[in-house]
Image (tube, helix red, strand yellow):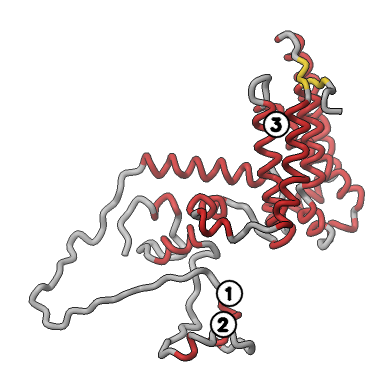
Amino acid sequence: MFSRKLSIISLVLIVAIFLTITGNVVFFSKILDTSLSENLSYIASLFIWLFVVLATILLLISNRYSAKPILIIILFSSAMVSYFTNNYGTIFDENMIANMMATNWAESIDLLSFKLLLYVVVLGVIPSYWVYKVEIVHHRLAQEFWRRFKVFSSLIVIFVVITLVFFKSFTLLSKKYAYLRLYINPTYHLYAIGQTINAQFKTQRMSFKIIGEDARIDRDSQHKKLVVMIVGEAARADRFSLNGYQRLTNSLLAKESVLSFSQMSSCGTDTAYSLPCMFSSLGRSDYSHTQGKNMSNV
C-alpha cells in the first residue's frame, strides 16, 4: 500500500477526496438543517463541487518539491479544525487565526485531550504517513503540462456544469445561508490564514498614528487617582448570575462590592479582537485590526 507509485495529480486528487469527506461533517449537517436539504441531488453535487474547488487549489500550489509538504501540513491543520468544529462548533475565521497567533503555550496546553489526540492521529498522522511513503512518479515537463491541462479542464467543466444546473440553490446558499461557508474545511481556514497574513503586511506598511498628544498631566492636583483595570477571559453574559442567571455562576464575585453592567456589549467573542477594540477610540462599528494596531489607544 505505502509503496504504491502515484503521480502528483493522483496524489492530490486522493487527498482532496479524503479532506472533503472527513473535514466537512459539520458543514453538511448544517446544510441538512436548512431548506436546501429537500434537494438531495444538490447535496450530492455540493460534495463534488467542494472537491473540485479544493482539488483545483491544491493542484495549483503542488509541484514535485512542494506537493508532499503542503498536503501533510493541510492534513494536520484540517484534523485540528475538524476536532474543534465538530466538538465545539468553533469557526476558524480571520479573528480566530489571529487569536491563535496571540495564544501562549500555557493557554494552549489546556486544550489538549485524548479525543484531540485521536483526531490528530486518525485524520492527520496516518494519512500524512501514507502521503510521505507514496513514491511520486515524475513526468517530463511537456507531458506534465498536458496532463494537468486535461485535469484542470475537466475540473472547470464539472464546476461550471454543477453551478449552472443548481444555480438557484447556490444563490440561496450564498445569500440566505452565507454563514455556512465558514464551516468549509480546509478551504475556509486556509483563506482565513491568507487574509491574516495579508493584514499583517498591510499593518507593517502603515504609519503609526499618535493621538492625544495635547493631553497633559496636572501635576498641581491634590486629588490624584490610580485606576487598576483587570481584564479577564471571555465569558457569556447570559450565564452570569450577577446579571440574573438562575444558576450561581459568580459565587465569589457576589461576595465583593462589585457593579455588574448588564447593558454592556463586547467588540467580539475572542481575546485577540475584543481586547484591542475595547481600548481603541475607533468604536465597535469602525474598529479593524489593521487600523487599531497602527494608532495609539488607552
Crowd band around label 3 with a 10 angstrom C-alpha radius: few (<14), some (14–19), many (20+): many
Crowd band around label 2 with a 10 angstrom C-alpha radius: few (<14), some (14–19), many (20+): some
Q: Secondary structure at mark 3?
A: helix
Looking at the picture, which amino acid does disc 2 mark? Answer: Phe
Precedes in sequence: disc 1 or disc 3: 3
Looking at the picture, which amino acid does disc 3 mark? Answer: Leu
How far apart marks 2 and 3 lie (CA) works out to: 46 Å
How far apart marks 2 and 1 lie (CA) works out to: 7 Å
The residue beneath circle 3 is 58
Looking at the picture, which amino acid does disc 1 mark? Answer: Arg
The residue beneath circle 2 is 240
Q: Nearer the viewer, residue 208 or 222?
A: 222
In the rendered structure, are the residues bearing label 2 and label 1 in contact, judged by CB atoms less than 8 Å apart?
A: yes
How far apart marks 1 and 3 lie (CA) works out to: 39 Å
The residue beneath circle 1 is 236
Precedes in sequence: disc 2 or disc 3: 3
Q: Secondary structure at mark 2?
A: loop
**Is residue 175 shown to the viewer in this render?**
no
Residue 23 location (% of width, % of height):
76, 47
